[in-house]
Amino acid sequence: MALHDSFKSSANANVRLAKLSSVPEEQDLSFAMTQANKHPKATIELPWKSPLSTTTFVLKVSIALGSEEGPRWTLHAGDSPDSAALWSHDSMDTGLIQSLISAESDPQRALNSYVDTNKKGDDSIWIKQPEPPAPPVERPAPKVNLPQPVDLDKAALDLLQQQMRRPETGMMSEAAFYWLILQEFNRFQRNQTPHAIIMIEFGLKLTGGAMSLPPVRVLHEVANRVQAVCRPLDTICHYKDPKLVLILPHTGSNDAMQIAMRINDVLIESPLGPGLDASNVVIHFGIASMPDTCSHPGILIATALEALEQGKKTNNTVVLFPSS
């Protein structure tokens, strides 16, 4: 019988749901929690009596004032106003509440609980947790004779990296960026692995408010500082000069925001070159991530660019797409 089929309200601010003939499932608890949110001044009562039990149980759900953990669930044994409270718990996790109910209302799985008499004025019963299981016995791993490692061809690796980098700055080229972002997209399609990109654009303020692109020696210093902040798997690349782009594998939008702010700090904490005042450096970051922003690599780049432009228009250093 559906819970809402006999939904009714009483004069004492209690809302009583239909009596169930079995232990409530998670969908029943979710419905009760929804009603508690709709009626914050009422107590939602969900009664049931299973065929294997001689007791009618009543679960009362109410909004616990001041609690950040969710509604308050109180289980009573008996349908009378003075029936005993078996336990009380604040939680948003209906799966947890359902497991506590099942254990309490099933005679074969009854919980060992006790009343905390030190809590005056509190009729809640606190559940004694079962003893933790004994740790598994660790067996030594079988000894395997491993072969000697194969020497990696460092010269071939260096040659490949030289072909992927811009020689004047040492940073990865725009073509390398496209290849790397497609690798991250393939990982996302296969394993739903998140990743983010940070578009970076900076310039130098000249007398009269004009802007100038930084010289190559400054770009070298920028690359060194960015890599010092990031992980070895994070890669900084050129993108549509004078922009740079940082690829962050296994990274969501919130972490990308933190990384962008750390990069900004290290770029302005001291001069990027002799005689270059840090206050004359203007930096903007535009951030997008997958799947937080979108699920297409081309759209990911476009949204990071849009966030970058919005930051330049609004004079905000770090902008995450979308932003109001």
Image (cartoon, helix red, strand yellow):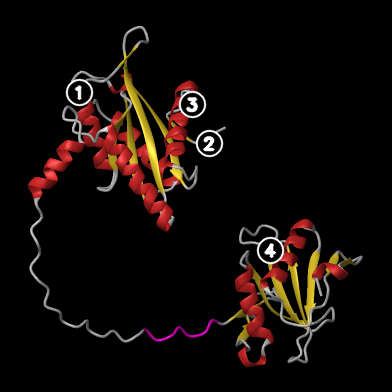
Q: x, y (%) of residue 48?
A: 78, 80
Q: In this figure, which residue is indicated by the disc labeled 2? A: 322
Choose the circle earlier in sequence order: 2 or 3: 3
Image: 309 above or below 76:
above
Residue 115 coordinates in the image, percent (x, y) = 65, 82
Query: Local crowd at mark 1 within 10 Å, few (<14), some, or many (≥20)?
Result: few
Would residue 248 be found to the left or right of residue 224 on screen? Answer: right
The residue to which callout 3 is attached is 310
Structural distance between the alpha carbons of marks 4 and 1: 59 Å
Return the disc, 1 or 3, that comes first in the chain's sequence.
Answer: 1
Screen quadrant of the C terminus: top right
Mark seen at residue 71: 4
Q: Where is residue 158 in the image (x, y as percent from the top left)?
A: 12, 43
Mark 3 burial class by Cα count in 10 Å: few <14, some 14-19, many 20+: many
Specify whether 16 is left or right of 65. Answer: right
The residue stretch that appears in magenta: 129-135
Q: For numbered disc 1, what is the local secondary structure?
A: helix
Amino acid type for the residue under numbered disc 3: Gln
Instruction: Tell me how far mark 2 sits from mark 3, CA to CA.
Output: 10 Å
Residue depicted at 79% across the width and 67% down the height: 44
Circles 2, 1 touching at the beta carbon (< 8 Å):
no
| Mark 4 vs mark 2, CA separation in Å | 32 Å
Would residue 263 be counted in the magenta stretch?
Answer: no
| Dot 2 amino acid type | Pro
Looking at the rendered image, the disc whose residue lies closer to the viewer, 4 or 1, is 1
Q: Which amino acid does label 1 sit on?
A: Val
